[in-house]
Amino acid sequence: MMPSHAGPSPNDAPAVAQGASGAADFRAAMRELAAGVTIITAGREHGRRGLTATAVCSVSAEPPTLLVCVNRSAEGHAAITESGSFCVNVIAAEHLPLAERFAGRDGARGAERFAQGEWGALATGAPVLADAIAAFDCQLLQAIDAGTHTVFLGAVTATTVSPQRAALLYRAGAFAATG
C-alpha cells in the first residue's frame, strides 16, 4: 500500500483565533508587523507638533505621493489639517530617544518635543530632522477619515536622504535597529 500525504499535521499549523477579531486581537496581530519608525511633523514655531508613527506608505512615484495614518486624538493631527502640510522623518537607530519622546514616553508635549534634535525646514515649512535617514516634505492633498484615524495623502515637495546608518524598526511593542 502506498503512503498518502494529507499535508501538514495539526501540530504544524499556527494558532488561529476563532470567530470575529476584536480591536484587541487586531492590535496584537499588528504588533507583529515589523515597520520602519518615523516622526511625522507639522506646523511652525510654537504650533509645531509631531508623533512617532509606523503607518506610512508610498502611494505613487509619478507623481511622488505618500500616505500617513494619524489618530485623530494625536496632537499632530490638528497641526497637519491646520497647516496643510507634514513631513515624514525616517529615523536612525541612534534616534531612539526621539522616537520615545515623540511617542509621549517622556512626558514632553507640543512644541516642547522639538527641544531635542536639530530641526529645520524644506519647502512646506514643516519641521525636518536635520540628520534623518530620509525626509519627505509633503503638501496635503486629501484627508480620509477611517475609524479612529485619518489617512492623509501628501504630494512630496522635497526630500533629503542620508542612508549610511542603521534604521530604527518597531515590532512586538519594542524598538530595534536594523543590521
Image (cartoon, rainbow, N blue to C red):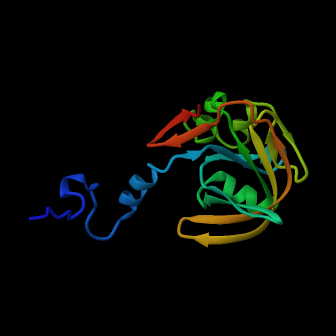
| Image quarter of the C terminus | top right
Judge from the rendering whether residue 153 lies leftward or rightward of residue 17; answer left or right.
right
Q: Which residue, as the protein is rendered here, is positioned at the far left? A: 1
Picture coordinates of residue 138 (x, y %)? 81, 57
Q: Position of residue 155 (x, y in %)?
A: 81, 63
Name the image quarter holding residue 172: top left
**Residue at horizontal 54%, vertical 65%?**
148
In the rendered image, the quadrant that contains the N terminus is bottom left
State the residue in front, 6 or 61.
6
Seen at 48% across and 43% down, the residue is 171
Residue 58: give x, y in percent of width and height.
70, 59
Q: Nearer the viewer, residue 133 or 173?
A: 133
Q: Exactly how many numbered labels are in the figure?
A: 0
Q: Position of residue 2 (x, y in %)?
A: 13, 64
Left or right: residue 166 versus residue 130 is: left
Q: Residue at x 28, y 62 (%)?
A: 17
Would you say 100 lies left or right of 173 here?
right
Which quadrant of the figure has residue 84?
A: bottom right
User: Which residue is situated farthest in the top direction here?
Assistant: 94
The residue lying at 65 percent from left, 65 percent from top is: 151
Above/below status of 47 relative to 105: below
Which residue is most to the right? 123
Nearer to the camera, 105 or 159: 159
